[in-house]
Amino acid sequence: MPKETGRTLIASNKKARYEYLIEDTVEAGLVLTGTEVKSLRMGRASLVDGYATQYQGELWLEGVHIPEYTQGTWTNHSARRRRKLLLHREEIDKLVAKAEQAGHTIVPLSLYFVDGRAKVEIALAKGKKLHDKRQTLRERQDRREAERAMSAHLKKHG
């Protein structure tokens, strides 16, 4: 079988970009079981409730839902188990130090395969206040209206 190349997106966490102000992003490897990898290859995962915590000097991804593999047997994994993140010591120390500041957390942004290996993009994020969320929505709406006006203008005069 030929070796897999390139980047294949499995899941992205759009809610995180709305709920949090992203300050720094890092790509991390994941320690997975065979049935988890097979389930991911079918394109099934949810990052919505995911977050990372420190436990015994390691970073662990929690709350990420990878459904059980349909053809799995008794070796199947539990859908929301804690999964170890593979990062260099300096990266772990830097992220944990920043995450311990008030209002900061580590959230997954996307889950993907790079050259056949499962990776997760995690971000150091700060929770947005309600008025910040409203501002984000307003900016998005203004951008859409401007694009509509431009396309209408081009159709009329194009």
Image (cartoon, grey):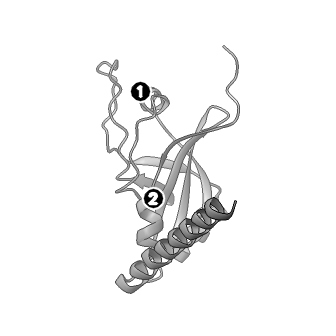
> From what the image shows, is residue 55 above or below residue 9?
below
Is 91 or 7 nearer to us in this picture?
A: 7
Q: Which image quarter is the N terminus in?
A: top right
Q: Are marks 2 and 1 in contact (CB under 8 Å)?
A: no
- The secondary element bearing badge 2 is classed as helix
Q: Position of residue 100 (x, y in %)?
A: 47, 77
Q: Is residue 12 visible?
A: yes
Q: Position of residue 130 (x, y in %)?
A: 35, 82
Which circle marks residue 35 in the picture?
Answer: 1
| Residue depicted at x 38% and y 86% | 131
> From what the image shows, is residue 129 above or below residue 124?
below
| Residue depicted at x 61% and y 70% | 94
- The amino acid at mark 2 is Lys
Q: Quadrant of residue 158?
A: bottom right
Residue furthest toward the top? 1
| Residue depicted at x 61% and y 35% | 117
- The amino acid at mark 1 is Thr
Judged by depth in the image, the label closer to the viewer, 2 or 1, is 2
| Residue depicted at x 48% and y 36% | 32
- Mark 2 or 1 closer to N-term? 2
Q: Is residue 93 visible?
A: no
> From what the image shows, is residue 21 above or below residue 54?
below
Q: Position of residue 9 (x, y in %)?
A: 56, 42
Is 143 or 78 nearer to us in this picture?
A: 143
- The secondary element bearing badge 1 is classed as helix
Residue furthest toward the front? 156
129 vs 32, left or right, is: left
- Check disc 2 and report the residue beneath it: 14
29 vs 106, left or right, is: right
Residue furthest toward the bottom? 131
Q: Residues within 10 Å of mark 1 (few under 14, many from 20)?
A: many
Q: Position of residue 147 (x, y in %)?
A: 58, 67
